Image: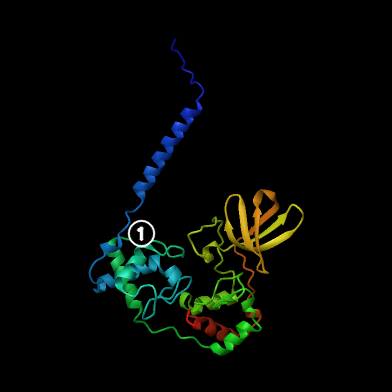
Amino acid sequence: MPRRLTPGPFTAAAVATLLAVALSLALRAQEAHRPTPVAPGAVLGPLPTTPADRAAGAAHFAAHCAFCHGPRGEGGKGPALAVPTLPRAADDAALVRIITLGLPGTEMPASRLSAPEIAQLAAFVRALGELPLETVSGDPARGAQLYAGRGACATCHTVRGRGGPLGPDLTAIGRRRSAVHLRRALLEPAADVPQSSMPYRADVSLPENFLFVRVTTRDGRDLAGVRLNEDPFTLQFRDTDGRIHSVVKADLAALRKERGYSPMPAYGAVFSPAEIDDLVAYLVSLRGTP
C-alpha cells in the first residue's frame, strides 16, 4: 500500500521565501512587458516632413494627445498647442524631450512611442503652430469686472497672488486651457473633476488630485474642504474659509470622499450668455504676464 505524504506546516521563513520568489517573478514579468524608454537624444536631426510622416504624426496625436490637448491642438485639459510658439518647447530638441519624458508634477506623461514615432508626433505638433489662432468673442475688461464682482471668483481663485486659495491658481489659465474648456468649466464645473478613486499622488498636479472631502470628528464636528494631501493614515484639506485641517483617519467618526463633485457654482444660472462670453474672454487673456 503506497504511503500518503502529508505536508507539514510551513515555517515563517519558508512562507517569506515563497513570497519573495513570487514577487521577484511578478516584477520580472512586469519588466518584460514594459517598453524600453527612448532617450531624448535618440531623435536626432531635423524632424520629418513627408506627407506620410505628417499623416503618421496626426494619427499618433489623435491616439495619445487629443484627449487633453484637443483634436486640433486647440487645448482642453492640456494647454493649447496650435500656437506659433510653445513656452516650454522653444526648439525641436525641447519638444522631443517633453514628449519623451513628460513633465514631472503635471498631467503630461512620458511617451511609450518609439523614436521614429516621437519624431513624427513632434513634427505634427510643430505644424499645429501654423493654424490660425483661436478667436474669442466677448470683452475681457467687462469679464474682469464680472470676475471680481458678481461672480465672486476671487473668493476661491488666485490671479497674480491675489484671491483665495481653495481653487486652482488662474494666473496663467489662458495659456493652459482653451476657451472651449474654460466655457465648459463655467457652465459645468464638475465635468472634469476626477470620478475615480485614485489615491493622492504627490507627483501630479491639482486637477488629477482634486477631491472634495467631508469628515465628522468623534466630538461631532462636521468639516469639509478640498484635499491637499493624503496617506493611508492622515488627511490634510483646506476648507472654504481657507483654513487647513490635518486629521488622523483612525480618530474620525466618518470620512466621505465626494468624487466627481466641485464646490464651484454653475455660472449659467448667474450670468447671461453674453456675460459668459466676457468672462471667458477675460480668462483667456490671463497668460501669466503682469
Query: Which residue is painted at 52% across and 63% down in the image?
Result: 208
User: Which quadrant of the view contains residue 273?
Assistant: bottom right
Residue 230: image x %, image y %?
58, 55
User: Which quadrant of the view contains residue 117?
Assistant: bottom left
Asked whether the viewer can see residue 56, the reply is no
Residue 285: image x %, image y %?
50, 83
Query: Which residue is painted at 57% across and 83% down in the image?
Result: 279
Asked whether the viewer can see residue 102, the reply is yes
Query: Which residue is painted at 57% across and 64% down in the image?
Result: 210
Residue 152: image x %, image y %?
65, 79
Residue 254 vertical placement versus 274 (above, below): above
Depth check, front residue: 145 or 191: 145
Residue 20 vertical placement versus 121 (above, below): above
Query: Which residue is painted at 26% across and 65% down in the image?
Result: 43
The scheme the figure's colours follow is rainbow
Which residue is most to the right?
220
Which residue carries the number 1 mark? Answer: 112
Counting other residues with Cα less than 10 Å from the Cα at mark 1, is it few (<14), some (14-19), or many (20 or more)?
some
Q: Secondary structure at mark 1?
A: loop
Q: Is residue 69 left or right of residue 140?
A: left
Indicate the amino acid at tag 1. Arg
Residue 21 vertical placement versus 48 (above, below): above
Which residue is most to the top?
1
Residue 30: image x %, image y %?
39, 46
If the image is split into quadrants, where does the N terminus sit?
top left
Number of labels in the image equals 1
Q: Is residue 177 left or right of residue 27?
A: right
User: Which quadrant of the view contains residue 259?
Assistant: bottom right
